């Protein structure tokens, strides 16, 4: 693949990223969530929050994720200030950074009226001319889905367990991803065609005040142990009026 492997399979042109987040045993399914009846306050994977299809929000999250340089990335160097780093003020969605292992307490301040996007298990691949397999849409799509099996996750929002999250999966169309210089993925910088896939929790805007989102996940993959990890993240969210 022309990459340097770590336990999260991080490389130059393909990033298979296992990130912490919400209760399910990952299964391949064609079922869709057509409403949020299972989880009031959670957008379904067939919805179009703020007029933008759910799958496009996944692409937007990945563009945010690769657009921050390594020294400041809140994934690896979290501070409450960095939780707000590179949040596009014009967007109606607030992006939570991922956690690749261990237990963390994270405090973030969110503007009222913004939805909140949390990655569950997700991968993205892009063609930066280092891997001929990524020259086709099929190759990008297949690559983006790798490494997402054998995940078990759970989550609560303000003490309420989120349910049936294996159904909240979507795959983006091909989009242009802009990778920052000195990025956290040791990838070439530039703008490249990409596809993102994964399970995400997209929360409807929360009322002003204090909220708690607790995310837990582990992966035990007997075939590809490089994906294995465990993490727990307590997000203390302050929604400002």
Image (cartoon, helix red, strand yellow):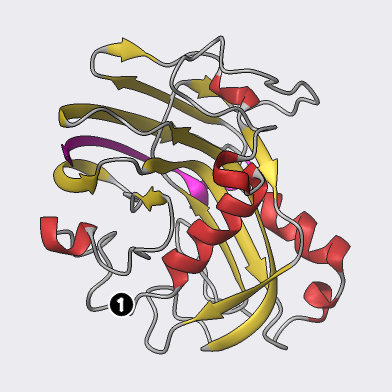
**As drawn, which residue projects farthest toward the front?**
241
The one of 42 and 91 positioned closer to us in this rendering: 91
Residue, x 56% and y 51% (percent of image)? Answer: 57
- 209 or 78: nearer the viewer: 209
How many marks do you count on the picture? Answer: 1
Report the residue at 47% width, 34% height from top: 201
Give the answer, above or below, for where 57 lies relative to 200.
below
Residue depicted at 54% across the width and 29% down the height = 43
Task: Identify whether 97 is placed above or below 157.
Answer: below
Q: Does residue 9 appear anywhere in the picture?
A: no
Magenta highlight on residue 240: yes
Q: Which residues are magenta?
A: 223-241
Q: Is residue 214 left or right of residue 32?
A: left
Q: Position of residue 24 (x, y in %)?
A: 52, 21
Secondary structure of the residue carrying numbered label 1: loop
Res. 5 in view: yes
Q: Residues within 10 Å of mark 1 (few under 14, many from 20)?
A: some
Q: Nearer the viewer, residue 2 or 13?
A: 13
The answer to whether 232 is drawn above or below residue 173 in the figure is above
The percent coordinates of residue 188 (x first, y second) are 53, 88
Q: Which residue is mark 1?
A: 70
| Residue 191 as seen in the image, left or right of residue 218 | right
């Amino acid at each position: 693949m022309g990459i340097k492997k770590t336990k999260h399979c991080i490389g130059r042109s393909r990033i298979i990223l296992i990130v912490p987040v919400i209760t399910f045993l990952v299964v391949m399914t064609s079922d869709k969530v057509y409403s949020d009846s299972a989880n009031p306050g959670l957008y379904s994977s067939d919805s179009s929050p703020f007029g933008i299809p759910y799958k496009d929000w996944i692409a937007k999250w990945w563009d945010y994720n690769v657009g921050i340089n390594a020294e400041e990335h809140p994934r690896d160097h979290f501070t409450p200030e960095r939780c707000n780093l590179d949040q596009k003020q014009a967007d109606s969605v607030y992006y939570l950074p991922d956690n690749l292992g261990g237990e963390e307490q994270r405090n973030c301040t969110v503007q009222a009226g913004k939805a909140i996007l949390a990655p569950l298990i997700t991968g993205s691949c892009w063609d930066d001319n280092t891997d001929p397999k990524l020259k086709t849409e099929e190759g990008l799509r297949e690559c983006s889905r790798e490494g997402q099996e054998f995940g078990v996750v759970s989550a609560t929002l303000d003490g309420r367990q989120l349910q049936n999250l294996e159904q909240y999966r979507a795959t983006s169309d091909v989009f242009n991803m802009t990778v920052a210089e000195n990025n956290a993925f040791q990838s070439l910088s530039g703008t490249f065609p990409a596809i993102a896939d994964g399970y995400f929790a997209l929360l409807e805007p929360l009322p002003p005040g204090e909220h708690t989102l607790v995310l837990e996940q582990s992966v035990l993959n007997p075939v590809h142990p490089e994906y294995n990890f465990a993490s727990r993240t307590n997000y203390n969210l302050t929604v400002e009026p």
